[in-house]
Image (cartoon, rainbow, N blue to C red):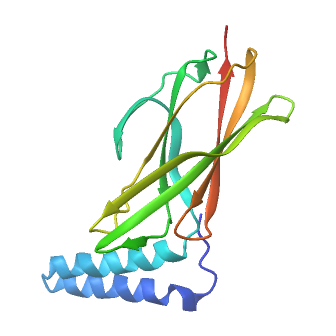
Amino acid sequence: MCGLGSVGNAEPISAAAAEAERLSAAGEHMRALEALDAATDALWSRAPLDFRTALFVSEAAGFGVYSPRADRAFRAGEAVTVYAEPVGFAYGRSGAFHTIMLGAGLAIRNSTGQVIAEAEELFEVALQSLARNREFNMALSFAMPDLRPGDYVGIFTVRDRNSAKTARFELPFSIVE
């Protein structure tokens, strides 16, 4: 959750929203949407990196197009896919393109709280687009390590390559025989 701090920090957002309301009342709906986009851009740029959702899936085909996995029980060596929707990431530039570049690591914690496996730079996800896409997802696929049956937590640490922003999410899971 993003805390804006003072009213002064919220002024560009509230001013853009008020402008959108005025434009909408005047029947200028496209310009009203552009004003709301400006408000969203202002909020997005000062928000921390965070996640709308993060879960185990059986299939991920794009933003909002996924099938949640029925359970969180895996066998050692089984293919695993994690779907996550990051927000608040920064944009880089490559010529005419905006770039989104995120790296992610994975640590696995056992039921006693001990981290038993860790890889800091396991995943890289990137997109180049002419638009500043906010509808962006990560599909992180890997083989479940050879762990003893029991309960664990996957700790995913995501680093924004276009800024100093980092965030993490945790997903509990079990290993079964």
Q: Residue furthest front?
A: 95
Q: Which residue lies furthest to the left in this view?
A: 27
Q: Is residue 19 above or below residue 87?
A: below
Image quadrant of residue 35? Answer: bottom left
Picture residue at 55% right of the left edge, 18% below the top: 78
Image quadrant where one finds the N terminus: bottom right
Residue 133 vs residue 10: left or right? left
Image quadrant where one finds the C terminus: top right
Picture residue at 52% right of the left edge, 69% below the top: 162
**Who is closer to the viewer here, 20 or 105?**
105
Measured from the top left, where is residue 11 in percent x and y? 48, 90
**Who is closer to the viewer here, 176 or 164?**
164
**Who is closer to the viewer here, 54 or 160?**
160
Residue 18 vs residue 69: left or right? left
Measured from the top left, where is residue 108 in percent x and y? 73, 35
Q: In this view, does 10 lie above or below 76?
A: below
Image quadrant of residue 165? Answer: bottom right
Count the marks: how many?
0
